[in-house]
Image (cartoon, rainbow, N blue to C red):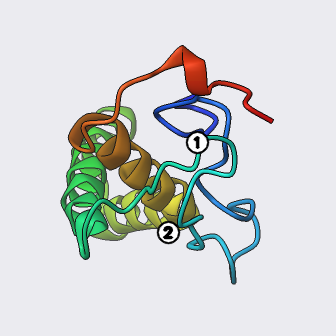
Amino acid sequence: MAFLKSKCPRCRSGKVFTHSFYQLKEFISTNERCPVCGLKFEKEVGFFWSAMYISYGINVGFSIVMGILVSIIFNDPDINVYVWAIVGPVVLFSTVIFRYSRIITLYMLGGFKYDPKFAQKT
């Protein structure tokens, strides 16, 4: 559940991002350290660059699934239907995809493990 709520991978309480993903000017802002346990999120300079590849993979997977669904539902329509059915949702969900690619990077590649002694230290 902490993963879905974008919480710290070590304490599962502190917020990774400073603002909601609805705030388009600030959705990219990440806390440097966990406000609860003090874990530094960016292990090294450029650590989150790997999230770019994860985001790419999510978008490619989504595009393939949407392309297949459009082909089945609309019986191989015009190319414009494919473009709008794929590009529209990708742009609409870009902030969510961006954030979860960073969360996946933290949880899977960060090497951080849940430690209950850090939970709710406040």
Label whose residue precedes the other's in the sequence (2 or 1): 1
Quadrant containing the C terminus in the rendered view: top right
Q: Which mark is residue 6?
A: 1
Residue wearing tag 2:
91
Instruction: Tell me which amino acid carries mark 1.
Output: Ser
Mark whose residue sits in front, 2 or 1: 1
Q: Nearer the viewer, residue 118 or 109?
A: 118
Residue at the (38%, 58%) spot, across then down: 86
Image quadrant in which you'd find residue 66: top left
Judge the density around disc 2: few (<14), some (14-19), many (≥20) Cα neighbours within 10 Å: few
SS category of the residue bearing label 2: helix
Q: Nearer the viewer, residue 35 or 68?
A: 35
Image side of residue 26 versus residue 12, left or right: right
Q: Is residue 122 above or below residue 90?
A: above
Residue at the (22%, 42%) spot, across then down: 109
Horizontal and vertical percent for residue 23?
A: 76, 72
Instruction: Tell me which amino acid carries mark 2.
Output: Val
| The furthest residue to the bottom | 25
SS category of the residue bearing label 1: loop
Q: Is residue 105 above or below residue 4?
A: below
Horizontal and vertical percent for residue 79?
A: 27, 67
Residue 43 appears in the picture as rendered: yes
